[in-house]
Amino acid sequence: QVYLVQSGGGLVQAGGSLRLSCAASGRTFSSYDMGWFRQAPGKERGFVASIRWSSGTTAYADSVKGRFTISRDGAKNTVYLQMNNVKPEDTAVYYCAAAPRGLAYEYWGQGTQVTVSS
């Protein structure tokens, strides 16, 4: 069983920064992809960023490119989402997720609220 426990989040002013963390346990994640998703009120959950654990290869949604950075710390089995220059439209519940490489995301964190005030 894979466990993903999120921390971070909260209220931040537009233009500010925030870091989300996702501590993973239960597996060896070298063959996993890790991702961050978000869901704003009244909208479907959408992709934010991903990282391949083994290679560190990353991908980003266009809306966050240049502002958000996904990274992982193998020693801590933790994935991070550094959010810089945040905007009110980044307000959402953020979820981390894990997927066996090449397959669908099947493990999810509990979600954490990020609210950006203008």
Image (tube, helix red, strand yellow):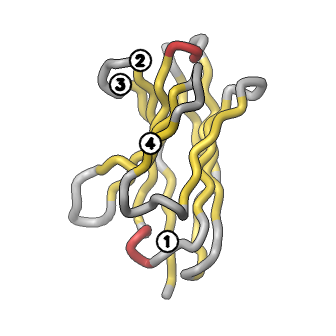
Q: Who comes first in sequence, dot 2 or dot 4?
A: 4
Can you identify the residue that label 2 sits on?
101
Comparing labels 4 and 3, the label whose residue is closer to the camera: 4
Q: Residue at x 46, y 38 (%)?
A: 50
Q: Residue at x 62, y 55 (%)?
A: 82
Q: Nearer the viewer, residue 110 or 54?
A: 54
**Residue 97, quarter of picture:** top left
Mark 2 surroundings: few (<14), some (14-19) or many (≥20) residues within 10 A: some
Name the disc covering residue 106, or none.
3
Mark 4 surroundings: few (<14), some (14-19) or many (≥20) residues within 10 A: some
Can you identify the residue that label 4 sits on?
59
- 7, above or below 64, in the image: above
Q: CA distance from mark 3 to mark 2?
A: 11 Å
Q: Amino acid at mark 4?
A: Ala
- 19, above or below 96, in the image: below
Q: Amino acid at mark 3?
A: Glu
Comparing labels 3 and 2, the label whose residue is closer to the camera: 2
Q: Residue at x 63, y 76 (%)?
A: 16
Q: CA distance from mark 1 to mark 2?
A: 31 Å
x%, y% of residue 12?
60, 75
- 1, above or below 46, in the image: above
Q: Secondary structure at mark 3?
A: loop
Q: Nearer the viewer, residue 55 or 2?
A: 55
For the question of whether residue 109 can be seen, the reply is no
Q: Residue at x 63, y 40 (%)?
A: 71
